Amino acid sequence: MNATPVTEAGDVCWLRSDIALAAAARRQAAQLARGICLPEERVARVELCVTEMATNLLKYADDGSLALRVVRAGGHPAVECLSLDSGPGIDDVHGALRDGTSASGSLGIGMGAIGRLADASGVHSLPGRGTVVFARFWADDRIPPPGPVRTGGLTRPISGERVCGDTWAVRPLGAPGSDALLLMMCDGLGHGPLAARVADRAREAFRDSGHTSPEAVLQDVHRGLRGTRGAAVAIALADAAGQRVRLSGAGNIAALVASEGTRSGLLSLPGIVGLQLPRPRTFEAAFPPGAALVMHSDGLSDRWKPADFRGLFAQDPALAAAQILNQAAVRRDDAGIVVALHRRP
């Protein structure tokens, strides 16, 4: 399998910014780290990382949260930590990452420490709008090499619920190391446990499908969701070698390809997968090196513009997904997004 840090949406622990954030984050992060058998020295690194993230949120951010989860690539697990805030942003990210830089008179080692502690990290900030900080800790030294298309995503339940009815999944098309990936974005109708059950069924059907075309996989998911309340689902084929994206979907799933300042939308037809699936159609767009495929549910506004996120698609796709969700999520609904980035040679 090519190096897809997250191949399926999993449980995400969301922690809102408050006075107890650092302690709660340390406790949850340590539990996740020990759950994938990180040695205690590595567990301590994860704890220090989330403590720095929590401290920065409380010191500098207007409002924010931490998202903690376990991710996997090719059987290799990692703990992933994301800090999201709604402002005021960082004017000089490179300066903030230098040790000794502080906006509050402290030692200023927090942001730089995160980069040194983690196996992978990144920061993206929009002055006046918000910042996302990302860190990943692998369970062993056999970190999968990056493939031609890297993917990542994130889900967040509606306020008041513990589980999310949105989900996503990614799998390689053909043999391990293939240059093509199939991606699914699913929005189970409604909220809470019943919608989450639909999302789980959709992931199972996507995982079990033996087909390779988006239309056929969509029909397999439709059959797998019969007897449920249904969902909006879109299936995309991201082909790095052919430099094309093909998408087939039904329901309110937004999809676009952003490349060199341009934005190409991919349509999803009206319908409810599992209940009323129209005759599938496929829409295509170019997918050159450097392009980003973004798919998300209607829990995110579709009014965001790639041009407003300068430098975002040079980051890890998990960070890119988090920043778009951070800026475009609708608070009154579940939110889910998956991003595929075609690496430049």
Image: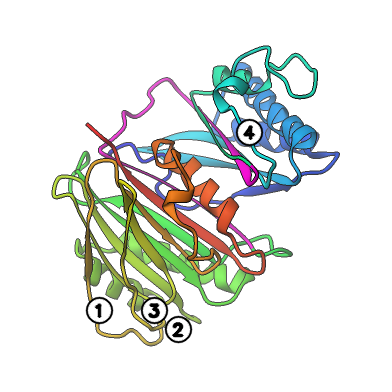
Whether pointer 4 and pointer 2 mark residues with C-beta atoms closer than 8 Å, the reply is no
Q: Per the image, is 135 magenta?
A: yes
Which is more foreground, mark 4 or mark 1? 4
Q: Which of pointers 2 and 1 lies earlier in the amino acid sequence?
A: 2
The amino acid on which the numbered mark 1 sits, given as a three-letter code, is Pro
**What's the distance in space between the residues labelled 3 and 4, CA to CA?**
42 Å
Q: Which residue matches tag 3?
A: 273
Q: Which of pointers 3 and 4 lies earlier in the amino acid sequence?
A: 4
Q: Which residue matches tag 4?
A: 90
Whether pointer 4 and pointer 1 mark residues with C-beta atoms closer than 8 Å, the reply is no
The amino acid on which the numbered mark 2 sits, given as a three-letter code, is Gly
For the record, the magenta segment spans 128-157
- Residue 328 placement (x, y as % from top left): 56, 58
Element type where label 2 sits in the image: loop
Q: Which of pointers 3 and 1 lies earlier in the amino acid sequence?
A: 3
Whether pointer 3 and pointer 2 mark residues with C-beta atoms closer than 8 Å, the reply is no
Q: Which residue matches tag 2?
A: 227
**What's the distance in space between the residues labelled 3 and 1, CA to CA?**
11 Å
| Callout 3 crowding tier (Cα within 10 Å): few <14, some 14–19, many ≥20 | many
The reply, left or right, for residue 17 in relation to residue 237 is right
Q: Which of pointers 4 and 2 lies earlier in the amino acid sequence?
A: 4
Q: Which residue matches tag 1?
A: 280
Whether pointer 3 and pointer 1 mark residues with C-beta atoms closer than 8 Å, the reply is no
Q: Which of pointers 4 and 1 lies earlier in the amino acid sequence?
A: 4
